[in-house]
Amino acid sequence: MMQISDTYNQKHSLFNAMNRFIGAVNNMDQTVMVPSLLRDVPLDMEVKEEVVNNSNGAANYYNRRDMHGYYILLKSIRNDIEWGVLQGEDRKKDKITSMDISRLEDADGEEDLEKQFHYHLNGLHIVLSKLTRKANILTNRYKEEIGFGSWGH
């Protein structure tokens, strides 16, 4: 028999966080019929973020803060979760450096794998929650932009 605390803990599991994110992105993908309509539309109605100008065209594309940039980014992350992260020179380096990891080492130089695991698990939960919110916001904003914001409710 499942206890209430088990249900609460399952709600906060990594597996469920990934499923919520993938579900939100799948919903976004099914709702957005014409992704090109998302270009130059800010994700947040109140905040218009700047486009990052970079010498690298691909980086500039992914750093766009319009709805289309988020749409592409969210779908890319979903694919990475479902199919695995591609390894290669063309792939961006992880933002977590070895210096970040070295902070988690003991004075003896021994790695504390449990601390590292919890550090990264917590970070992954935070990022997945933010990405899930972005996918839901994008879906709702798309509905508003094309004029059926109240459909399906």
Image (cartoon, grey):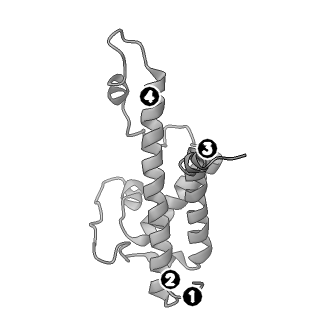
Whole-angstrom CA distance, mark 1 to mark 3, is: 35 Å
Residue depth check, mark 2 versus mark 1: number of the one nearer the observer = 1
Which label's residue is closer to the chain start, 4 or 3? 3
The mark found on residue 84 in the picture is 3
Q: Residue 113 appears at what percent x and percent y?
A: 48, 22
Which label's residue is closer to the chain start, 4 or 1? 4
Q: What is the crowding at mark 4: few (fewer than 14 residues within 10 Å), some, or many (at least 20)?
A: some
- For the question of whether residue 92 can be seen, the reply is no
Which label's residue is closer to the chain start, 3 or 2? 3
Q: Residue 135 appears at what percent x and percent y?
A: 49, 66
The mark found on residue 143 in the picture is 2
Specify the amino acid type for callout 2.
Answer: Lys
Residue depth check, mark 4 versus mark 3: number of the one nearer the observer = 4
Tell me: 12 left or right of 137: right
Residue depth check, mark 2 versus mark 4: number of the one nearer the observer = 4
Q: Residue 58 appears at what percent x and percent y?
A: 42, 56
Q: Which residue is mark 4?
A: 116
| The furthest residue to the right | 1
Q: Residue at x 60, y 70 (%)?
A: 27
Q: Which residue is mark 1?
A: 151
User: Marks 4 and 1: CB-CB under 8 Å?
Assistant: no
Q: Secondary structure at mark 3?
A: loop
Whole-angstrom CA distance, mark 2 to mark 1, is: 8 Å
Q: Secondary structure at mark 2?
A: helix
Which label's residue is closer to the chain start, 2 or 1? 2
Whole-angstrom CA distance, mark 4 to mark 1, is: 45 Å
Which label's residue is closer to the chain start, 2 or 4? 4
User: Marks 4 and 3: CB-CB under 8 Å?
Assistant: no
User: Marks 2 and 1: CB-CB under 8 Å?
Assistant: yes
